[in-house]
Image (cartoon, grey):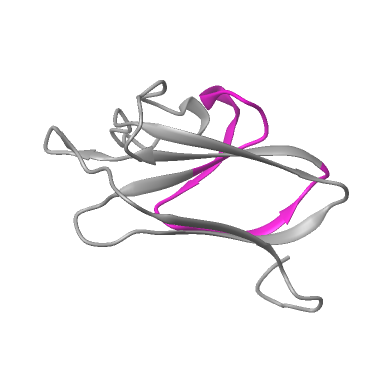
Amino acid sequence: ADAPSVWDTYPACDGGQDESGGERVYAFTLDARTPVRIGLLDRGAVDVDLHLMDGATAADCVYRNDKFYEGALDAGTWYISVDTYVGNGRPNPGEYLLFVVACEDGDPDCR
């Protein structure tokens, strides 16, 4: 994301990635446990990563992926940080599409 960088690491989700590029944080609230799909689409030289957090800080990271999350989330407020990956000392910010959708009932891939 073409934004200021507040967080460079996500301790609970750290796999050694350099996330020192800018990030944008989004929040959403679920009223009940809900199976969801979260997707992050970018293109070209843009390289942003998805971090799912159960609190409002990087230390609250529960899941990290380049593009996708699929599973049930408990009721409450959840946060998504879309953070810019830095490769070879260069951040790769740019446009992306983030979506969060409830899964269809009975979807076997989304529990």
| Up-down relation of residue 1 to residue 9 (above or below) | below
Residue 74 horizontal/vertical position (percent)? 80, 46
Q: Quadrant of residue 54?
A: top right
User: Residue at point 62% right, 25% down?
Assistant: 56
Question: Which of the two residues, 4 or 78, is positioned nearer the viewer here?
Answer: 4
Question: Which of the two residues, 38 or 28, is positioned nearer the viewer here?
Answer: 28
Residue 77 horizontal/vertical position (percent)? 74, 37
- The stretch drawn in magenta includes residue 71: yes
Q: Quadrant of residue 44?
A: bottom left
From the viewer's perspective, tell me whether residue 14 is left or right of residue 110. Answer: left
User: Residue at point 25% right, 52% down?
Assistant: 46
User: Residue at point 39% right, 26% down?
Assistant: 9
Quadrant of the image for the C terminus? bottom right
Residue 72 horizontal/vertical position (percent)? 74, 56
User: Residue at point 30% right, 28% down?
Assistant: 20
From the viewer's perspective, tell me whether residue 73 is left or right of residue 7. Answer: right
Question: Which of the two residues, 59 or 48, is positioned nearer the viewer here?
Answer: 48
